[in-house]
Amino acid sequence: MPSKRLSVVVTRRLPDAVETRLKELFDVSLRDTDAPMTQDELVAAVKSADVLVPTLTDRIDAGLIGQAGENLRLIANFGAGVDHIDVDTARSRGILVSNTPGVVTEDTADMVLALMLGVTRRIQEGLSIMQKGEWEGWAPNALLGGRLGGRRLGILGMGRIGQAVARRAKAFGMQIHYHNRRRLRSEIEADLDATYWESLDQMVARMDILSVNCPHTPSTFHLLNARRLKLLKPSAVIVNTSRGEVIDENALTRMLKAGELAGAGLDVYEHGHRGNPELRDMPNVVMLPHMGSATQEGRMEMGEKVIINVKTFADGHRPPDQVVPAML
């Protein structure tokens, strides 16, 4: 008799090839629509499934986990960030959590540079003029921005993505500085020509561009609060492709409106997915809809990692990308 296949519930539409492979391996429930599951649908999923495959749009909190059926033993997240999952509560219930680390590194780092260029070279303003048909021809003083070469870049969070940003920025001729929970090994610092700052306040006050590349955890919530944002130079630019909760968005908005910052490039937002409405009309702010990891290659690699994690678990082994509270 063949062994019973795992019951797997997928909460969002995934790439066709990923869904097809999941269907081949497991007893899978797939979505017909790309809309996020409702709370009632999530409750039904955790009550029935052996494995839940959520995304960052699903809030897997203690209340939801408390309603899980006895069969739920793995939450195989489609994505690297797990701040939407209560890992501690899952662990206390004997439910493993896995993620997909590493696959979004290069794509997100590309987007950091795109946002830096978008703000410093006033690309959004140029696009708007062209789209409105308002361009009257080249002029020596029109839309003057600034070059990246020679600017000091402060990287907040020097993990995989932070280091990938540093490599790109170095190629642009930028001076690399960083603040991290742990200092990098000396050979990595030397390879990146990176200067370490133990004091985030001291680093922030000296940077021309600040890139946020740390995860959202209780210790990083509003790490860039109103007081710390005030330390930035008025000519500074801030870029965030990590998590919106790291920045006090209301304080950032007030400073941009008051001309106390030169600009911002944002791919993530503190409150929901729309961002502060006042930011949308600012010519020196580039806003994107969480596109940092949005490449076909990245989504496929994320799906492949999910499949490996679930298949390894089904075979009776620990998922290779298991997340434990000590990692957070």
Image (tube, rainbow, N blue to C red):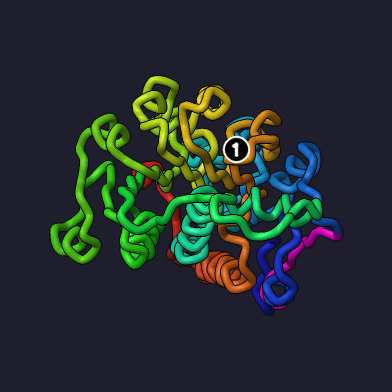
Furthest residue to the top?
227
Compare residues 309 and 270 and report the one nearer the observer: 270
Q: Is residue 28 magenta?
A: yes
For label 1, count other residues whose C-alpha is less than 10 Å away and answer few (under 14), some (14-19) or many (20+).
many
- x then y, percent, for residue 62: 58, 32
Residue at horizontal 60%, vertical 58%? 78
- The magenta-colored residue range is 24-32
Q: Nearer the viewer, residue 236 or 159?
A: 236
The residue at the point 34 percent across, 67 percent down is: 171
Name the foreground residue: 225 vs 139.
139
Q: Is residue 58 above or below residue 110?
A: above
295 within the magenta span:
no
Image quadrant containing the C terminus: top left
Find numbered disc 1 in the image and state the secondary structure of the residue it sits on. Answer: loop
For image coordinates 48% across by 52% down, the residue present is 116
Q: Where is residue 150? Give x, y as percent.
A: 30, 55
Give the camera-side residue of 219 and 110. 110
Query: Which amino acid type is shown beneath numbered disc 1?
Result: Tyr
Q: Is residue 252 left or right of residue 5?
A: left
Q: Is residue 25 above or below residue 215?
A: below
In the rendered image, residue 327, in percent from the top left (x then y), is placed at 36, 47
The image quadrant where one finds the N terminus is bottom right
On screen, residue 68 above or below 296: above
The residue identified by callout 1 is 269
Residue 270 visible in the shown view: yes
Across the whole image, how many numbered discs are drawn on residues? Answer: 1
Q: Quadrant of residue 53?
A: bottom right
